[in-house]
Image: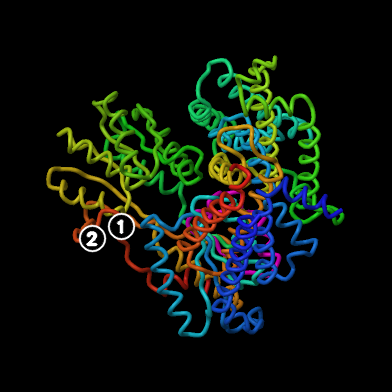
Amino acid sequence: MNTRSVRGVVALAASLCALAGVTACNVESDSDTAKSGASASAAAAKDLKVGWSTIYLTPSWMQQTLKMLQADVDKLKSAGKVSTFKTFNANGDTSQQISQIRAMIQQKYDVILVDAGSSTALNPALEQAVAAGITVVAFDSLPTSKKVIRVGTDQKAWGSMMAEWLAGKLDGKGSVIAMNGPAGVAVSEDRWAGAETVFKKYPGIKIVSNVHSEYNLAPAAQSFASAYSAHPDIDGVFSQGGALSAAALQTLIKQDKKLVPITGENYNGFLKLWKSKQKEGFSSIATAQPNYLSVIALEAAVAKVEGVSVPQDITVPLPEITDDNLSEYVQTDQPDDSYPINDMPQSEIDKLIGK
Amino acid sequence: MRERITTAARGNTDLLGLLALLLVLLVAYQHYDPSLLSPASVTILSAQFLPLILAAAGQTTVMLLGGIDLSLGAVLGLAMAVFATYDARGAGGVMTAAALALCVAVAAGAVNGTLVAYAGLPPIVVTLAASFLWSGVTLVVLPQPGGHVPAGLVDAYNNGWYGIALPAAALALVLAVWKLLRTTRHGLALYAVGGNEHGAYASGLHTRGVKIGGYALAGAFTGLAGIGLAVQTGSADPTIGTPYTLNSIAASVLGGISFFGGVGRMRGTVLGALVIGLLTNLLLFTGISPFYQLVIQGVILVAALALKTYVTREAAE
């Protein structure tokens, strides 16, 4: 009986500690709730409460995006336009992202930025946020909802830009291995759809193998190696992501094979390989999902609150990295897993968001 | 009267700790969001938690049989895809779509069960293989996010229907069915086979049939979870189900379901799923850095499990 009561006390004490712990956390975050609710009025945005819900935060592309976004937040903070900025990481779980958006609605955020984990599943939650008077701007991976502002690149154009270059390079004929992202993911499907329409115009080009892989070096290298061993006589590789391109190029180098043209992305690991093999005749083209999409999204949200008529769909032009301007992008002193890109000038951002 | 309360408390010692944790979370939640107990919040929260609770119920059914279902997320995605694309494939109402999705999920569960029962393979291997199979089938049904759920239904589910929280009602219905089922021969057989397969067989139970039935029932729960998620999100996404596999296991284990089968109650699983759901929401409110949120979530779950084991050790001694 005695041990029983001891156990009861332990359980009770634990509950109390937990309660105390949770309430203690509150002290620091409550300090900024006393903001004026006058943000809806036009002219000047003041003390906006901004939240960013992202499906992933750990990949280096996301880390760079957060860094650029944070720099812009600091700028807007010192201008008095933004008071708080919080990042929410869903860690790959779309249902978790829905909870995050609902939590931000309940906490009366003024601006919600979102990098969506699913092109459709977030729509009801985001539209609820818009109905609650919150300015919602999506960037990078976009939802299909027509009620939120969407800042992105044209993924189909990405695919067709790569395919067009490759078809030109091969004079419209040859066998090609296609390296795509995971099946069922909107970005991957869109880029491939763009590429496919181009390849259809060139009946001489044969896709001998269509590989799906994570956008990661190790799984991509494995997938490419098995496709390549089945088709060692290819004339080119269509790749829709930098890690996939690096995996393909690495395999060719390792096996000491002919360096056929491979399309790419501004993944530094790929750019470095490209640079080092350029004098051996390797040629490529690359584009980028620019990290400054996040900055444009935040600027668009602030402008919208200030009464600017921001366009619903903001399509940011895709940068083009070629054999000629490669050296402006590649950063040989930086790690492979980074995405070199220059900031976008404020004037160009203003033009895009309709200022 | 007092005696009865003590007996009830004794029978549920393992759940009392969990209930206390849930109450703590609710009080803290109330502190951040004073509208917690308003009908609107109850609707929103139950809409959000329903898929996890149902998925955990499916996982619990398999775990009571001494198995584990790694294909749960894939089957959930499949049911979701079938439900949301049925409309586009031909005439038919929402009910037909739901029935079809449910049938597909039950069939998927029955296939898992048959492989476990007749091929004699360990459930973890069978369901791991099945997870690839079913996610592949899902991609055939729905190659990329899309599909369609009637807007009226989405609104009724997420924002209440004549003031009734539909998800909460659905949950109550499912739990009532489970409670009824548990007292039948089939329900008892489920526990018997999970607890001691040889003993159950020696007592004249058709253990293979019980297993197949149990996996099919788990499929039904998973299918309902998929339909719930489709209605919540107004669409289907072939990859959205994956996290539910591990989350459903976490909820079941937290709810006191034994990995070795035959031990545990569905009400524990429901509490476990609620704790996990509320905890993640609560951490969002606190505004702690996202990486620490994961750390805290893990620490609290481990602490809760350790505490529960400590408090209930007496029963085992």
Chain of the residue under the numbered disc 1 shown in the image? A
Magenta segment range? A115-143
Name the image quarter holding the C terminus of chain B.
Answer: top right
Q: Nearer the viewer, residue B275 or A346?
A: B275
Q: Amino acid at mark 2?
A: Gln
Q: Which mark is residue A338?
A: 1
Is residue B303 within the magenta segment?
no
Q: Which mark is residue A252?
A: none
Read off the residue under disc 2: A334
Q: Residues within 10 Å of mark 2 (few under 14, many from 20)?
A: few
For the question of whether residue B274 can be seen, the reply is yes
SS at badge 1:
loop
| Residue A324, picture quadrant | bottom left
Tell me residue A343's x, y (percent).
35, 68
From the viewer's side, name the closer residue of B171 and B159.
Answer: B171
Q: Residues within 10 Å of mark 1 (few under 14, many from 20)?
A: some
Task: Return the chain for callout 2.
Answer: A
Is A71 left or right of B27, judged from the image as shown? left
Contact between labelled residues 2 and 1, with CB atoms less than 8 Å apart: yes
Residue at the image point whose x is 70% and y is 41% from the top:
B266
